[in-house]
Image (cartoon, helix red, strand yellow):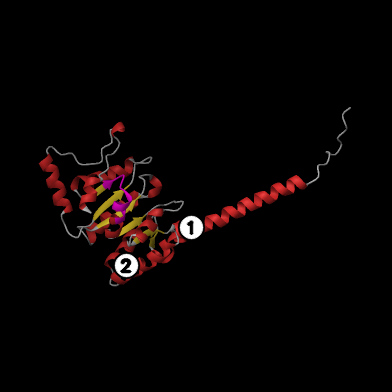
Amino acid sequence: VPGIIRARLHEGDPTKGIEVQPKFLTLREQESFYARNLRKKPLRYLLCVSTIEPRKNHVRLLAGWEVLKASIDPGIKLVVVGGLGWDYALTLRGFRPWIDRGELFMLNAVPAPDLRVLYRHATATVCPSVGEGFDFSGVEAMRSGGVVIASGIAVHREVYGDAAAYFDPYSTAELVAALKQVLYGDHGARVQEHLRSRGEEVSARYLPAQILPQWDRFLSQVFAGRKAAIAEAVARPVTAPVGATEEI
């Protein structure tokens, strides 16, 4: 995991002068920084995989993680994977002090094999969005053997079912409570085992072998319906509009 983090650090947006990594005066200083902050084994971190934009709710995740560090687990890191979307200035301002301390790492362009490693070794993958169309990151985490804690929006509950722990995306207290219950509660190990087991089953629903036959059936029905509609239109006799007169 430390090697993946080092190799996939986010470059920000040089065209806009946006930097999201610490500045170092020397290579030795840089090497010392990452060796110091990534050397703990096992490395404990929360993972979030999504574009940086308001609806993804990184600000809430940051607030919950800060409370968690202050109250119960000072050593836990935050790893955020994703490109810069829109209106991300507030999020980056919140991230920056923690990036400079080596507590938060922003990554981008992480290839699938490396991403699976990050999912598998994360203390938990958090999906904090206030709005989504699907949010495949939770399914990816489940498929990789990870634990998922997600906002309780309708799409998450529909897609993830009972394979995730849920919280109100507008409540930092609920996020912290969910993290504590799943990761540090008296029955935390049992809860994590249950979520992983259910995650393996739920994520299997979205494998190509399961999805493609459904698409085939759906498209066959669409084409059959269209074909029937065209045939009906062709067979229908053409009648002159009411009041029409023959041109001479």
Q: Position of residue 95 (x, y in %)?
A: 27, 46
**Does any portion of residue 153 appear in the rendered image?**
no
Q: Is residue 20 left or right of residue 129?
A: left
In depth, the one of 245 and 221 nearer the eye is: 221
Label 2: which secondary element: helix
**Does any portion of residue 179 appear in the rendered image?**
yes
The magenta span reads 106-116
Rendered image: mark on residue 211: 1
Q: Is residue 89 above or below residue 168?
A: above
Q: Quadrant of residue 15?
A: top left
Q: What residue is rendered at 36% in x and 68% in y?
A: 197
Inspect the image, locate mark 1, and give the three-letter code of the amino acid beneath it.
Answer: Ile
Q: Is residue 209 above or below residue 109?
A: below
Rendered image: mark on residue 192: 2
Q: Position of residue 20 (x, y in %)?
A: 26, 41
Inspect the image, locate mark 2, and give the three-letter code of the amino acid beneath it.
Answer: Gln
